[in-house]
Amino acid sequence: MMWEAPHLLVVHPTVPAQSLEAFLNYARSNAGSLSYGSSGVGSSTHLFAEMFKARTGLEITHVPYRGQALALNDLLGGQIKVMFPIIPDVISYIRSGQVRAIALASENRSDLLAELPLMPRLGYPDLVASAWTGLYVPTRTPPAVIERLRSEADALLHSASFVDRMKQVGVEIRPIKGGEFEAFTQQERARWAKTIAELKIRIE
């Protein structure tokens, strides 16, 4: 594993909510009228949004797009009012005021959004989700090649300039190797498989 970035709840500025509680109240009083965009059925932006809906009891219509860029375009234009992206996808729009960040789906604060409330601390302990990137190779890859890749990856992930550049866009370096990474992968797979089953999400 190399790095990860947490999801967050963002809204179009026309949504009159500055906090998670205010957003929930607004959404409940406008049940069925709000829609959220995702980068596609089965994407992390879709699965986490459905988990958020289930935990909070909200009714928000899902609008799947063919990619994050298309969804963001419609969020910026106000065609959809809500999204659950990761920080790197929206940090520039948050800074410019084109979207408003409401709460972060993480147990740890973000350096870029230090004042943003954390969903677990607002009464939703399991609303934690992030997109992460790992380095994989085919099963029969020669050990020497694997070690070379690990060495190069380690060098990159411990480069101060690279780490700083990633943090500037909201990505946290998280190097996890071998068996520990395999355990993490299995845990993530089990968690989201359970979520899909519980919420009866159809992945087509």
Image (cartoon, grey):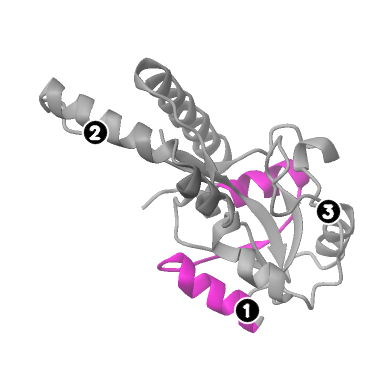
Residue at (47% x, 26% y) in the render:
190
Along the viewing direction, whichever of 126 and 180 lies nearer the viewer:
180
| Circle 2 SS class | helix
Q: What is the residue that sits farthest to the front in this orientation?
A: 160
Q: Can residue 158 be seen at all in this image of the molecule? A: yes
Q: Which mark is residue 119?
A: none
- Horizontal relation, residue 60 to residue 184: left or right: right
Of the image marks 1 and 2, the number of the one nearer the N terminus: 1
Q: Which residue is mark 1?
A: 76
Q: Nearer the viewer, mark 2 or mark 3?
A: 2
Question: Does label 2 or label 3 sit earlier along the sequence?
Answer: 3
Q: Residues within 10 Å of mark 1 (few under 14, many from 20)?
A: some
Q: Amino acid at mark 2?
A: Leu
Pointer 3 residue:
20
Residue 73 point in image, percent of width and height: 54, 78
Q: Select label 1 or label 2 by which is in front.
A: 2
Q: Quadrant of residue 137?
A: top left
Indicate the secondary structure of the residue bearing disc 1: helix
Q: Position of residue 49 (x, y in %)?
A: 62, 52
Looking at the rendered image, the quarter that the N terminus falls into is: top left
Q: Does the rendering let one see residue 99?
A: no
In this picture, is 58 found above or below 27?
above
Q: Which residue does the image show at 36% across and 35% down from the upper left?
A: 155
44 sits left or right of 107 in the view: left
Vertical relation: 154 (above or below) 109: above
Q: Distance between the Cα atoms at labels 2 and 3?
A: 43 Å
Residue annotated with mark 2? 149
Per the rendered image, the range of residues in magenta is 48-77
Give SS at disc 3.
Answer: helix
- For the residues labelled 1 and 2, say whether their Cβ atoms are less than 8 Å apart: no
Please tell me in which quadrant of the rendered image residue 72 appears. bottom right
